[in-house]
Image (cartoon, rainbow, N blue to C red):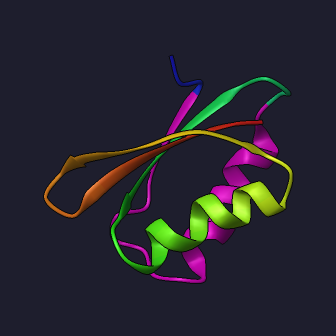
Amino acid sequence: MATKVLDITKEHCPMTFVKTKIELSKLNEGDILEVLLAEGEPLDNVPRNAKEQGYNVISIEHVEGTTHKVIIKK
């Protein structure tokens, strides 16, 4: 169960990870952030950047159309 859901499907890089990082910074250790994003650059960059910043990317799954869901644990 996600602690927080962030919808960045209308955002473009680099704002996609900036907004994701801001939300992650508000969470406590062990909390879960569910990020809804568009395929393409955001889907490539957000999970990779989250891993590089030391976060645990639990899953990446297709929701519908061009929307995907990335589950990140702080």
Residue at 51% across / 71% down in the picture?
A: 44
Q: Quadrant of the C terminus?
A: top right
Nearest the eye: 8 or 72: 72
Specify whether 11 is left or right of 71: left
Specify whether 40 is left or right of 46: left
Query: Quick check: is 8 in the magenta stretch?
Result: yes
Q: For the magenta stretch, what is the residue range? A: 4-27
On screen, residue 56 above or below 46: above
Residue at 43% across / 61% down in the picture?
A: 8
Query: Quick check: is 17 in the magenta stretch?
Result: yes
Which corner quadrant of the image does residue 26 belong to? top right
**Percent of width and height locating residue 28:** 83, 28
On screen, residue 57 above or below 20: above
**Percent of width and height locating residue 30:** 79, 23
Nearest the eye: 2 or 22: 2
Specify whether 9 is left or right of 23: left
Which corner quadrant of the image does residue 45 belong to? bottom right
**Percent of width and height locating residue 67:** 26, 57
Residue at 58% across / 77% down in the picture?
A: 15
